[in-house]
Amino acid sequence: MFCRWCTSNLKNRVIDTYLKRYKDEGYVEYIGIAADEPKRIKEKCYPLVNWGMTEEDCLKFCYDRGFTWNGLYKHFDRLSCWCCPLKNLKELKILYKYYPELWEQLKQMDNRAYNKFRADYSVEELEKKFQKEENKKC
Ligand code: SF4
């Protein structure tokens, strides 16, 4: 099982440390979870949930105001760190196919790491797998 070291250390801990400063004054923490992500709702404030805005509504809201996410949502259903080892195979294949420079960087990082990118595949192994799948299509 993956331990989300990055989420706890680089995100949650940083936010918690910051918020501690305002402990005495009190504060409201707003979280941008959409209305169609009910499993992620806990005990904080979720304005998008209150407004009934789904992920699709939120994306449309952004597009309508000219924020295009540089076309990333044309390829991906969800966005996360580009080098996230928790990406599923579909997302990794998209990275391989449409973002070759990032894929190359990922391969280099994996080659320098002491362990494989994923328990089941290194980035090079994934590349071979994706190449094979692409060649089958021809
Ligand atoms: S997207 Fe992946 S790499 Fe990025 S913080 Fe979340 S778990 Fe970590």
Image (cartoon, rainbow, N blue to C red):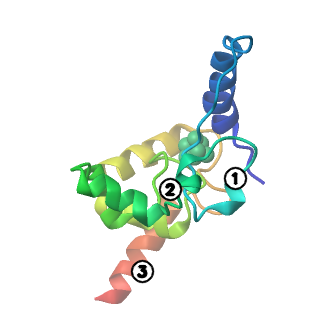
Amino acid at pointer 2: Val
- Tell me the residue at 61%/47% (across/down): 46
Do labels 2 and 3 touch, CB within 8 Å?
no
Q: Which residue is mark 1?
A: 41
Image quadrant occupied by the N terminus: bottom right
Confirm or reject: label 3 Cβ below 8 Å from ligand 1: no
Amino acid at pointer 1: Ile
Query: 10 Å neighbourhood of mark 1: few (<14), some, or many (≥20)?
Result: some
Query: 10 Å neighbourhood of mark 3: few (<14), some, or many (≥20)?
Result: few
The image shows residue 126 at horizontal and vertical percentages of 50, 64
Q: Is residue 73 above or below residue 111?
A: below
- Tell me the residue at 21%/50% (across/down): 66
As drawn, is 38 to the left or to the right of 71? right
Do labels 1 and 3 touch, CB within 8 Å?
no
Disc 1 to disc 3, how far (Cα)? 38 Å
The image shows residue 54 at horizontal and vertical percentages of 50, 63
Q: Which residue is mark 3?
A: 133
